[in-house]
Image (cartoon, rainbow, N blue to C red):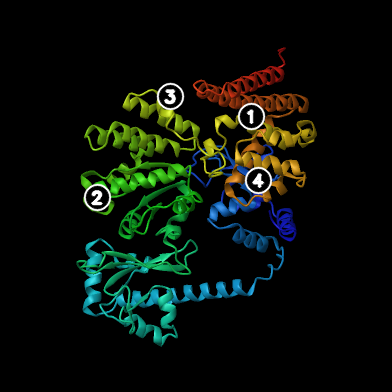
Amino acid sequence: MKSSSSTSAIADIKARLSIVDVIQGFVSLKKSGKNHIGLCPFHDDNNPSMHVNDEKGFFHCFSCGAGGDVFGFLMRYSNIGFGEALKELAAKAGVRLPAPRPRTKSARKKEAAAGRFFEINSLVSSFYSQNLLASRKNSAQAREYLESRGVTSKVIKEFKLGFVPDSWDALMKFASRNNISIGELEELGLVVARESGSGHYDRFRNRIIFPINEITGRICGFGGRILGEDGPGQPKYMNSPESPVFDKKNVLYGLYHSKSEIGRKRKAVLVEGYMDFIKLYTNGIRNVVATLGTAFTSEHARLLRRFCQEVVIVYDGDAAGIRSAVRAGEILLEQGISSSICRIPDGLDPDDYLGLHGPESLGELIEDAVDVSDFIIDDTFTRYREKKISSGESIRFLADMVSKIKDPVRRAEAVSRATGVFGIRESEFLSLVKSPDPGKNRGSLAPAALVPEKSIHEREIVRILLKFPGLLSAAKIENIEKHFENGDLKVILKRVGEGEFTEISSLMSSFEEIEMQQLLSELIFSSDDLIDETTSEKILNDCVRELELRDIAFKRNEVIDRIRKQRDSSDKSLERELVEKYRDLVSMEKAIRGTVS
């Protein structure tokens, strides 16, 4: 929740700015009844599907599900955080923001140190770039190598590629001329202390350099590709070690350059390394992003989720690449992101395939990518058929994969396909599948699945209470909340019940998360069909009753399972107790349904 001073500033900004006027600065809008409509900038929209309501102060796209208030629009459109959107809109509205809270001495020191490290990285990057363009022999060899890979001088400048000569101390000499200490270079991992303890040497010597940008464009680290063959103990590719400004599990190469296109298409193409990124990006596939030649992480998935709802994995076509793609696909499944795997034929990597067949052919392969769960099922069955893994291993592996799928529709499809391929009963397979955690990965579902089918009654309750908040007392909100399973809907219900937000716009502003604003805008826009309060109250009570019945059914099934397990036990008193509990639940169910026991 925001501070009162921040909340006041947000309210002032909204009072002074029309959301229609702000959005019209980016998108052409046309008046349509009480709304304005236009082409949605967050997906390839050919038929105006974005609606903007000036009175309520929010927008919603009925195709891709994007929605929110004026802050949510700017955050999504410009791929910026709430703080940046607040500053930009405050300046536009002429609202003076409250002074930030005084920071602790340690926080100020940490921030100053980070600023200094980013400054050093920028200076060092310029030094590396100058080396690549120098007339010395090694620099010419580096340029020849890049040219042989199809990297032009224009691309070198665009991505600020560089080179470190085959020297032990070139960077340290540069640092001494620019008031950069050896200690600072060592903390950033740019130099390494000699094992003998006497002096340091350049970490990236004799390597082509790829500066790594964090999301706002600042250089946080470097990647290096050795010039020539990698010798003993010398990896072909090397990244900066972790530092105060670099954590490889939270950084994706090229995202700073491609985030706008990824956001526009709502889809990212994921590759493994720097060269794959550069070649795809410069050949027109501009929604591409790369890991740093390292394993894809859940942090990477959450970072991508800020910009898109679909990821196509385009790793090397060899066995190792396929294994890595499957692991990345499982992580994306676990984070609720729709994903597919593109298999590059003949064991080629994307860069090689691009050179042989061109961008159009690679684009077609990407378009034909296979849904990740289908890919994993097919790949597992192939390995089973080739006797690389047993039937039991295959089924347990697929059950674990299905356990990671959060979307109930996609999960059911995967169960059906896996059991069909292996010829086993769904009940047997499901006994191995773990139930998803309903509170995990809030807001990670794609717009079409913002509210799963099982939460439909919860959605209807929130929708009605947003339209008719006066029904709250009749609804006994504290009793309703305990039946909610959907984490997002539960949060909205709780805030509505607290009664702090007398206007929808202020409720919307209480959420900084784009996903929450998206869900809330969908609920509000869809509530326009609720006209009669009396009828809505009846629907509300029916939905509450359905939630109560759902909970009783769940408890009843639990008791039945315990009774079955207890039958072989000598403790008959516990069995009688469970039977009595079962009867009580049946009586409660009948009472709720309005029948006589």
Residue 58, numbered circle: 4
Rendering coords of residue 204 (x, y %) = 31, 73
Q: Residue at x 43, y 83 (%)?
A: 181
Q: CA distance from mark 2 to mark 3?
A: 43 Å
Dot 1 corresponds to which residue? 457
Residue type indicated by callout 3: Ser
Q: Is residue 122 left or right of residue 582?
A: left
Front disc: 3 or 4:
3
Dot 2 corresponds to which residue? 353
Q: Earlier in the sequence, mark 2 or mark 1?
A: 2
Dot 3 corresponds to which residue? 427
Residue projecting furthest to the top:
596
- Would you say the residues marked 3 and 1 are in contact, meaning their CB atoms lie under 8 Å apart? no
Q: Residues within 10 Å of mark 2 (few under 14, many from 20)?
A: some
Front disc: 2 or 1:
1
Q: Earlier in the sequence, mark 2 or mark 3?
A: 2
Front disc: 3 or 1:
3
Q: CA distance from mark 2 to mark 1?
A: 50 Å
Residue 80: which quarter of the image?
Answer: bottom right
| Nearer to the camera, 513 or 58 | 513
Q: Is residue 314 visible?
A: no
Residue 112: which quarter of the image?
Answer: bottom right
Residue 480, numbered circle: none
Q: Residue at x 70, y 42 (%)?
A: 494
- Would you say the residues marked 3 and 4 are in contact, meaning their CB atoms lie under 8 Å apart? no
Residue type indicated by callout 2: Tyr
| Nearer to the camera, 403 or 452 | 403
Rendering coords of residue 369 (x, y %) = 34, 40
Q: Mark 4 falls on what kind of element?
A: strand
| Nearer to the camera, 50 or 67 | 67
